[in-house]
Amino acid sequence: MTLQQTISRLYRQAGIKQGSSHSGRRSLAAKVLAAIDSMPDATLVKVVAKTGLDKKTVTNLITQAGEQAGVRIIKSGPVYTLESWGPIIKRSGAKMALTGALNAPTIPT
């Protein structure tokens, strides 16, 4: 199952009708980028721990952010460094994604 299919399935299960796999990937990518930006020695293991995502997803999102959003990430040994956010993803929004500030409020049932 691809990342796009997984995100689309999660939206359907959550009853979100207007959510697209594109918006979900962008939110996850922003979360990963904010995690990298928030620590001086951002290794894959540390980014996984901070985001709660698996290694494969984090690696794919880093690659896609570079290819599709113009983000520039340098990898030196095991350490990732975010050099440029590019023109699409905003640092302030990414920080909000990482902290959960963009999450919808929980509605008691």
Image: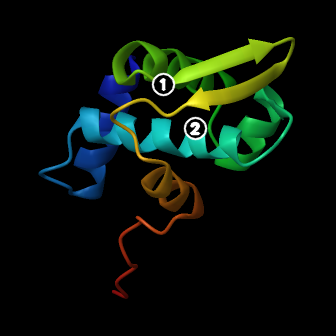
Q: Name the amino acid type tagged 1.
A: Val
CB contact under 8 Å: marks 2 and 1 = yes
Of residue 26 and residue 89, the one placed in the foreground of this image is 89
Q: Quadrant of residue 65?
A: top left
The percent position of residue 37, horizontal first and vertical second, equals 67, 42
Residue 71 numbered tag: 1
The percent position of residue 60, horizontal first and vertical second, equals 53, 18
Vertical placement of residue 42 versus 27, above or below = above
Measured Cα–Cα span from mark 2 to mark 1: 9 Å
The percent position of residue 50, horizontal first and vertical second, equals 73, 48
**Residue holding disc 2:** 33
Q: Earlier in the sequence, mark 2 or mark 1?
A: 2
Image check: 15 left or right of 9?
A: left
The percent position of residue 101, horizontal first and vertical second, equals 48, 69
How many dots with numbers? Answer: 2
Residue occupying the point 37% across, 88% down: 108
At label 2, counting other C-alpha atoms closer than 10 Å, the crowd grade (few under 14, some 14-19, many 20 or more) is many
At label 1, counting other C-alpha atoms closer than 10 Å, the crowd grade (few under 14, some 14-19, many 20 or more) is many
